[in-house]
Image (cartoon, helix red, strand yellow):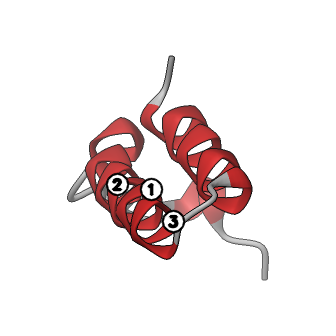
């Protein structure tokens, strides 16, 4: 399961939680998972435009 899906599950569980402490814990976990998910999208991606990429 991807980190974003796990974060979504944490948020849903936080919404359903009975206590404020549990909600805070779930949301904190969700934020950590979203931060970790950045690795799934790559880092330092660069793209150099060449003549074939020009639109004008």
Q: Where 56 sits versus 30, above or below?
A: below
Q: Residue at x 41, y 44 (%)?
A: 41
The residue depicted at 53 percent of the width and 42 percent of the height is: 4
Residue ranking furthest to the left: 44
Residues under numbered marks 3 and 1 in contact, where contact means CB atoms less than 8 Å apart? yes
Numbered disc total: 3
Tag 2 secondary structure: helix
Circles 2 and 3: CB distance less than 8 Å? no
Q: Secondary structure at mark 1?
A: helix
Quadrant containing the C terminus is bottom right
Residue 54, percent from left and from top = 66, 70
Mark 1 highlights which residue? 26
Nearer to the camera, 56 or 11:
11
Toward the bottom, the furthest residue is 56
Residue shown at the point (54%, 66%) measured from the top left? 19
Name the one closer to the observer, 28 or 38.
Answer: 28
The residue that disc 3 covers is 23
> Pointer 3: residues within 10 angstroms few (<14), some, or many (20+)?
some
| Residue on which the image places disc 2 | 29
């Amino acid at each position: 399961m991807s980190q974003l899906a796990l974060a979504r599950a944490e948020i849903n569980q936080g919404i359903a939680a009975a206590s404020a402490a549990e909600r805070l814990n779930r949301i904190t976990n969700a934020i950590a998972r979203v931060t970790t998910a950045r690795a799934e999208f790559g880092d330092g991606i660069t793209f150099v435009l060449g003549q074939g990429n020009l639109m004008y």
